[in-house]
Image (tube, rainbow, N blue to C red):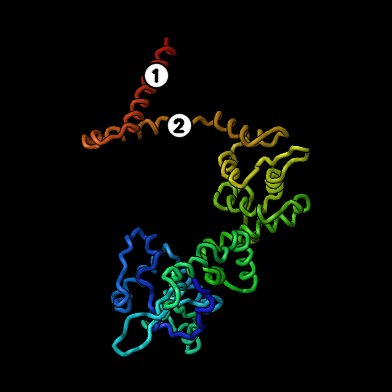
Amino acid sequence: MKNLSALLTPQSVNLCDLLLDPNNPRFSELGEELNPIPEGRFADDKVQSNTFEKMKDPLFDVAELRDTIKTIGFLQMDRIVVRRWKGTTSDGRKKYVVIEGNRRVTALKWLLNLHDIGKETFDEERLSNLNKLESLVLDDTAVSTTATLILPGLRHVSGVKEWGAYQKAKAVHALRKSGMSPQEAAQSLGLSTRSANSAYKCFLALEQMKADEEYGDSAEPKMYSYFEEIFKRATLRDWLGWSDESERFTDQGKLSEFYSWMVPQEGDNATAKLPESKSVRDLSQIISDENALNILRTPEGSLTRAIARYETDHPEDWYPKVVAATAAIKSLTPDMLRDMDSATINSLGDLSTRIAQALKDRESLMV
C-alpha cells in the first residue's frame, strides 16, 4: 500500500457538501445487519436523513458532542477525513463521503438544523465556524478500499487514548474554578452534568485527603476510585458528613478513620484494611453496624471478619426468596416445561432434593 499521508490533501469543505456514510461500520453496534447501500444513492435525501437519525442514537454519544461544540465552538484540531463521492448531482456540485468524523459531522448538522428551526440562534461568525471545515481529502483511486477502514481505525482502535477518571475530574474542577457553571463545564468536556458533578466532588474529596496532616502523603490519583465508590453510596457519604455547601467531608474523626483503612498499616507485610476501591462497596453494608465496625477497628481486624460478624447478627431473610421461587414454579406453562434443557431440569431436581432434606432435618430437630 502506498504511503497514506501522500494521498491526503488538505482542503476546506462546506458542511452541506459532506455526506454521512450510510454504510458506517459502527451501525453494527445497533444490532443491524450491514446491507451496503449503493454508492450512487448516498446523496438521496431519505438515505442521508435515515443515516443522520441512526447517528443520533444515544449509543454514539453525539448529543454530548453537539453540546460541547455549542458551548466552545468547533475546534478543528483533528481534521475530518473524506473522499470524493463517485455519484453525481443534478447541479454537478462535488460531494464528499465522510471516512473519519461521522460523529462530528452529525453534531454539526444537528446544530444547524436547530438554528434553521429557531431552537438555536448563531451569529454569522459561529455559522461560519460550523459550516467551513478543514478536511483531508483521500485520493481513494490510488489505494485499496481497506484505507477507508485503516484511517478511522487508527483513531478508534489504537488512536487517541481517553483520559482516565482522575484526569477528567481534574479538568472539570479547573473549568468550574475558572468561572464556568456546572453545565458549561460538563458540556465543554462532552460529559453529562450529573457525571461531571460527581467527578468534581470526587476530585475535591481526594484534594481534602492530600491536605490531611497525617495521611496527605499517601493520597495519590489512583485513590480517586475510592471516593467514586463513596459518592455512589449515600450511607457512606452521610457517615463521613459530606457537605455540598462547604464542598468537603465534615466529620473529621470518621474521615481520619476511613483514611487509615485505605492506607497499609505499618510493618513488613502490611496491607490496607480496604485494599482496593471495591472494598468500599462491602464497607457500605456494615457502616451502620457498630458491632461489625468494632471488629474492623481492632488491630487484627479485617473487612472479611467484620462482614462475617454482620452476617451472624443479621441472618438473611430466606422466606421471601422461597415465596418468589414458589411463584416462579407456579408460572411454568406446559410449553415451558416441554422446552426445558437438561441444565434447567437438573437445577429443579437439585431444588427438590434440598427442600426434602430441609424438611427432614426439621423433623429430626423437633423430636
Residue 160, compared with residue 119, is above or below; it is above
Count of marks placed on residues: 2
| Label 2 crowd (10 A; few <14 / some 14-19 / many >=20) | few
Q: Amino acid at mark 1?
A: Gln
Question: Which residue is at a point 39% across and 19% down the rendered structure image?
Answer: 357
Residue 19 or residue 189, whichever sits in front: 19
| Residue under numbered circle 1 | 357
Q: Quadrant of residue 349?
A: top left
Q: Secondary structure at mark 1?
A: helix
Q: Can you give x and y, in whole percent of width and height, for residue 73 in the image?
A: 52, 79
Q: Can you give x and y, in whole percent of width and height, for residue 24 in the image?
A: 39, 68
Identify the mark nearer the N-term, 2 or 1.
Answer: 2
Residue 61, compared with residue 332, is above or below; it is below
Q: Is residue 302 left or right of residue 154?
A: right
Question: Which residue is at a point 23% across and 36% down the rendered structure image?
Answer: 333
Question: Which residue is at a point 31% across and 90% down the rendered structure image?
Answer: 91
Q: Quadrant of residue 276?
A: top right
Q: Can you give x and y, in whole percent of width and height, for residue 74 in the image?
A: 51, 79
| Label 1 crowd (10 A; few <14 / some 14-19 / many >=20) | few
Q: Secondary structure at mark 2?
A: loop
| Residue under numbered circle 2 | 317
Q: Is residue 157 visible?
A: yes
